[in-house]
Each structure stands twice: as C-alpha cells, then as structure tokens.
Image (tube, rainbow, N blue to C red):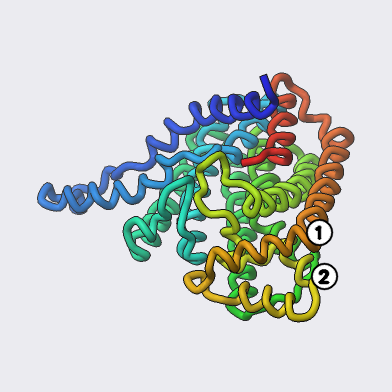
Amino acid sequence: MSEDQTALEILSHYKSLVWPVVDKYINVPDYPKQFRIPSKYQNLVDHQMEIINDYPTRKGKYLRPTILILTCLAMNGKIEEVLNTAAAMQISEEWILIHDDVEDDSEERRGQLTLHKKYSFGHAVNAGDALFAIQQKAITNNFGVLSPKIAKNIADEFFLIMSRTTIGQGVEISYIKDKIVEYSDEDWFFIADSKSSYYTVAGPIRLGAIIAGATENQLNDLAEFGKNLGRSFQIIDDILDITSNFKGLKNQKGNDVYEGKRTLILGHLLRTIKGENKKKVIEIILKNRSYKSATEVDWVIQQMHLYGSIDYSKKIALKFKQKAEIVLDNKLKFLYKEPYINELRTLMNFVLERDH
C-alpha cells in the first residue's frame, strides 16, 4: 500500500468520526416558541438549509480536524473530548471557503460550482454567516465536555486563529485591489502565515494539544512546527494549482493566475523576468478574471516554468519541510503515543509530497 493510500485512509477514518458531529450541528435549532418556524414558511427554510449544507456535504479532506485529533491523542488525550472542537474546526473551513470564493469570485470548489455561482452572492454570504454561528455553537458546547478553563482556552485560541486568518485575507485582497505586483518572499510569508501556517497547521495542532493539557512551552514549540510546515504546505498547494487537475476534481489549472493571487511563485517570476515579457505578465495578472483568456493564463504558467519560479518555490518548500522535521524530532517528543504520532508523520509527508 502506498503512503498516499495510507494517508487517505487516515483522513477517511477521522472524517467518519467528525462528520456525524458536524452534521448534527447543521440543522434548524429549537427556537423559543415565539420564534418557531410557521409551517407555511417551511419550504423557504428548507431551501436555506440546503444552501447552508451545500459545502459541508461536499466534504473536503478533513485535514485540519484530523491533525487536531491526532495531536490530542498523541498526548494521551481522549477522543470523546476532542470531537466537538474538531467539528468546529471543520465548520470553520466551510464558511471561510464560502467567503473566500465570494471575495475571489472563484468558479469551482471541490469539483462543483462555488456557492455564489450556484445560487447567488447574497445566499452564499448568508450561508457563510450561518455556518460561522454554528461554529460558535460547537465551541460553546465545549463547556459541557471540557473543564471550564480548557473550554475557555479553546475559545480564546479559536479567536486568535480566526483573527489572524482574516488579517491575512484582508492583506491579500488589498494587494489585488491596490494592484501591488512588487513584493518579497517575506511579504508573501506574512500572508501565508495567517492563512495557512496558523489556520491549517499550527492552530489545529495547538487546539488538540490544549485539550490534552499542553503547557505554554509546548504550545510555543507546536507553533514553531506549524509555522514551518504551514509555509511548506501553502507553497506546495500553490504549485499544484498550476500543475495538477487534482485527480480530475478541477477543470481549470492556474486558478491563482485567473484570480491574480500573489503567490511565492508569481513573486519570484516578477523579480526575475524582464522587459516586455514582464510588462505582459503584469498586464495579465492585473486583469479582471473574466477578461483573462486560457491562452494568457497558460502563457504566464509557461513563464513560471521557463524562469525557474516553480523550481525555486519547490526548494523553499523543502527548506521549510526540513525545518519542521527538525522541530518535530527535537522539540515535540511530548507527542509520543502510537499509532497517532506515526499517523501525523504520514499526513505531514502526504500534504508536502501529494499531487492533488
């Protein structure tokens, strides 16, 4: 069995544990009797619930809740104590993706039309808002599962994760809106640390560790690990955007180029390419998505290959992967319990060496 198959089996197993908890939360709550839904409006409410359930039922990889759970279990935590937080983590991904897709005017998500293309901008934003409220309910319910101190620490950590994530998204939007095309690797790391390092890796790992009773020093070491691994993860994700069709789930390569996303790859290209070709790249990047042709996007991708921007980014990704491995081997020995630490290592290799 290949490592990819093993990693997918790990993700599938923990998804099967988390999804029923997610599904339980995404329903019409029991309102006070004065605000219960009259039967004549039930069809309208059913339609709203269909929209709210759309992204969750498409089911992503469940990477974030899986590494959250594995971290907790690797520190000898209990599965029944972590599932609620894992569900909240996954629900957060759903509303963030909906809002990101609206902000970027993306076309596809998990092989289907994005929510605002399938329904409307208003419906999509509203569904994201509803899922945010549901996420908050899942976090609040920790006070019935965990000690008051740990439940509060989980809520505080969620706030920090979401706060930094929205800062990163806002900066990325500003770069696009203000037509900023000259930026350094450090500038890109600032955005990636918000949107990937913290949200995708360090945050979920820290949440799992908090439930297992981690110390401040342990949480700090986990943040260092997550920062390096998250940077590497995002670089690989951006490379795959222009080189992979994600096992047939994505009909259009170069989505980041269509959206004008500032990536490590694009930053290197713009610092390396010269003359008229540089002007042409900038002209294409700054165009509104709807005015970019497939030929133009393919040409930009060709330049990324030609000027070594993809190879450069692969080397940077490898550097951060190696840094993460050093932290894991030397500072995270408190992640000790098998098979969970081995499953964490398998997932780490999968996300950094995957082709989809």
Q: Are marks 1 and 2 in contact (CB under 8 Å)?
A: yes
Measuring 65% from the left and 50% from the top, which residue is drawn there? 243
Measuring 71% from the left and 47% from the top, which residue is drawn there? 233
Q: Looking at the picture, does residue 255 appear above or below residue 74?
A: below
Number of other residues with Cα within 10 Å of mark 1, as a class: few under 14, some 14 to 19, many 20 or more: some
Tell me where residue 173 appears, x and y as whole percent: 59, 71
Q: Which mark is residue 272?
A: 2
Quarter of the image holding residue 176? bottom right
Tell me where residue 25 appears, x and y as whole percent: 39, 40
Q: Which mark is residue 95?
A: none
Measuring 64% from the left and 60% from the top, which residue is drawn there? 164
SS category of the residue bearing label 2:
helix
Instruction: Specify the amino acid type for callout 2.
Output: Thr
SS category of the residue bearing label 1:
loop
Tell me where residue 138 appears, x and y as whole percent: 46, 42
Instruction: Specify the amino acid type for callout 1.
Output: Gly
Which quarter of the image is occupied by the N terminus? top right
Name the residue that disc number 1 marks: 308
